[in-house]
Amino acid sequence: MKNVIFIFFISLVLCSCNKMSPIDFVKWVENEDNGLRKEKTIGECRFEIQYCPDEYISIKKGSKDIPFTNIDNRETDSGLCFIFRIERLSDNYDPSAFQLINEANFRLMSEADTVGSSMVLYENNFRLSSVESYTVLFDDIQAKNDFRFVYDGQVSMTGPVIFSFKKEDIKRIPEINN
C-alpha cells in the first residue's frame, strides 16, 4: 500500500511540473535555451525570430480563453506563426524599404518540401526605431519534422537568413495551468 501511495504522489508531482502559469509559459517560450527563439547578426543587421504557439499568442494579446493544446494537437495544427525582427545596426539602409517585405520573402523548408508564407503583417514603427517587426504565418503546415525558416535577405542585402527549428523543441512546449 505504501508503494501505491508513493507512486501516486510521484505521478502527481511529475504531472504538475509540466504545467506552468501563463507568465512562466511566456518566459519559457521566449528563452533562447528552449529552441523557440533565435538570433543572429549578419553584416549590419541583427535578425531575431520567435516561434509562437497558439497559447503564446493568446496570452500576449490578453485573451482569457487560452486554447487547450497537448502534444497531439500541436502535430495537427493547421499552421505556424513566427515573429521575425530585423534590427538595422547602421544607417546604411532606407527604413522605408523594409515596408516592402511581404509573403514572397519568407518560406519554410522541411526535408524535401518548401512552403511559402501565407501572410506577413508588418508592424509600422513610423521610423522611431531601428527594429522592423513582422508576424509571419504559414497555413496548412505542421511541425512534424525539423524545419528551417528562411528569409531571402533581399531588402537587407544579406543573402538568405536561415533559422533551424527542431521538432523535439516544439513537442516539449509545456502546458499552461489555467
Image (tube, rainbow, N blue to C red):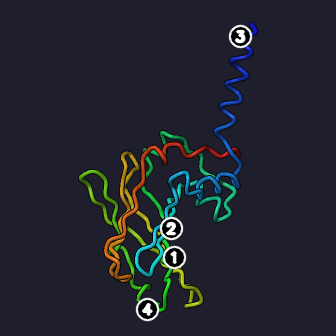
Given residues 41 and 153, the one toward you in this image is 41
At x 36%, y 69%, the residue is: 161
At x 49%, y 69%, the residue is: 48
Seen as rendered, the residue at the extreme front is 43
Q: CA distance from mark 3 to mark 2?
A: 48 Å
The secondary structure type at the circle numbered 2 is strand
Q: Amino acid at mark 4?
A: Asn
Q: CA distance from mark 1 to mark 3?
A: 54 Å
Q: Which residue is mark 3?
A: 3
**Counting other residues with Cα less than 10 Å from the Cα at mark 3, is it few (<14), some (14-19), or many (20 or more)?**
few
Given residues 19 and 79, the one toward you in this image is 19
**Dot label at residue 133:** 1
**Counting other residues with Cα less than 10 Å from the Cα at mark 4, is it few (<14), some (14-19), or many (20 or more)?**
few
Q: CA distance from mark 3 to mark 4?
A: 68 Å
Percent x, y of residue 75: 43, 44
At x 68%, y 63%, the residue is: 62
Q: Which residue is mark 2?
A: 83
Q: CA distance from mark 1 to mark 4?
A: 18 Å
At x 31%, y 58%, the residue is: 109
Q: Is residue 63 above or below residue 127?
A: above
